[in-house]
């Protein structure tokens, strides 16, 4: 069984549209994350979230919003998509927010904005 | 300027050769992790190092954390095609209250048969 699963795997859409990416983890972890990987393979954190606290990277546009219906899910909503939003988005989870707690990543969603 | 710089950015070697990948910073980290990412997949954790000077071995892979906890290296002995992938170091700064894992720029390793 996949530990962290995200859908869709590929998403192609036009500028200005609104889209969502779903993420689910079955590891029982307390904390979930969204990362963005650009064309140069650089991974940058967007959000970290547990049932108590949402931490937002200040560089993330407010067009991006995480939504967590329960502890096992953290979906990513993107409004008014722009060309520069094209990237691979990874969901991840960890048992705690401790520095030594490893991240478990999903297999990514490749978003292409045309 | 990225917080964690990895070198080399790209590395292509023949099967059986040895290699070392470096992860450097001017900042001090409380811990550092190494991940490997294969095409179409997410990164997978290889190791976590937490003590300055610490050395950890994982089969043919040897990881070292610098004495000052500002840098790390990954050495692979007798590389195999299965080692091919993107190697990422990631660290958590000693400063700051929230968990913020910062990733390095990555090293794309290709091992040719």
Image: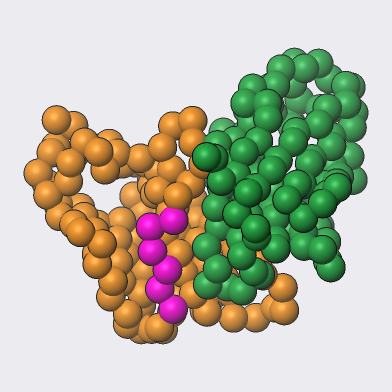
Chain colours: A green, B orange
Above-or-below relation of A72 to A15: below
- Does the segment drawn in magenta span residue B48? yes
**Residue A59 visible here:** no
- Quadrant of the image occupied by residue A27: bottom right
**Residue B53 visible here:** yes
| Prevailing secondary structure of the magenta residues | strand
**Residue at 25 percent of width and 38 percent of height:** B82
Quadrant holding the C terminus of chain A: top right
Q: Position of residue A7 (x, y in %)?
A: 68, 30
| Left or right, residue A83 beside residue B45 | right
**Residue at 71 percent of width and 17 percent of height:** A12
**Residue at 73 percent of width and 58 percent of height:** A48
Q: Position of residue A79 (x, y in %)?
A: 89, 32
- Does the segment drawn in magenta span residue A85? no
Above-or-below relation of B77 to A38: below
| Left or right, residue A43 beside residue A73 | left
Q: Which residues are magenta?
A: B45-50
């Amino acid at each position: 069984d996949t530990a962290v699963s995200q859908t869709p795997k590929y998403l192609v859409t036009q500028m200005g549209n609104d889209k969502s990416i779903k993420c689910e983890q079955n590891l029982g972890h307390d904390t979930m994350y969204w990362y963005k990987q650009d064309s140069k393979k650089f991974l940058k954190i967007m959000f970290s979230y547990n049932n108590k606290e949402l931490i937002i990277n200040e560089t993330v546009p407010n067009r991006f919003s995480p939504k967590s219906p329960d502890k096992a899910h953290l979906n990513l909503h993107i409004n008014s998509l722009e060309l520069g939003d094209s990237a691979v988005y990874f969901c991840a989870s960890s048992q705690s927010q401790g520095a030594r707690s490893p991240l478990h990543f999903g297999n990514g969603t490749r978003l292409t904005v045309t | 300027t990225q917080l964690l710089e990895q070198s080399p950015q790209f590395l292509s070697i023949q099967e059986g050769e040895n290699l070392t990948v470096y992860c450097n910073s001017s900042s001090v980290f409380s811990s550092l992790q190494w991940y490997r990412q294969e095409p179409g997949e997410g990164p997978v954790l290889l190791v976590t190092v937490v003590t300055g000077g610490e050395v950890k071995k994982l089969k043919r892979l040897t990881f070292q954390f610098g004495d000052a906890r500002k840098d790390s290296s990954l050495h692979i002995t007798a590389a195999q095609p299965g080692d091919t992938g993107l190697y990422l170091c990631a660290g958590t700064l000693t400063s700051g209250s929230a968990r913020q894992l910062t990733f390095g720029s990555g090293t794309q390793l290709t091992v040719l048969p």
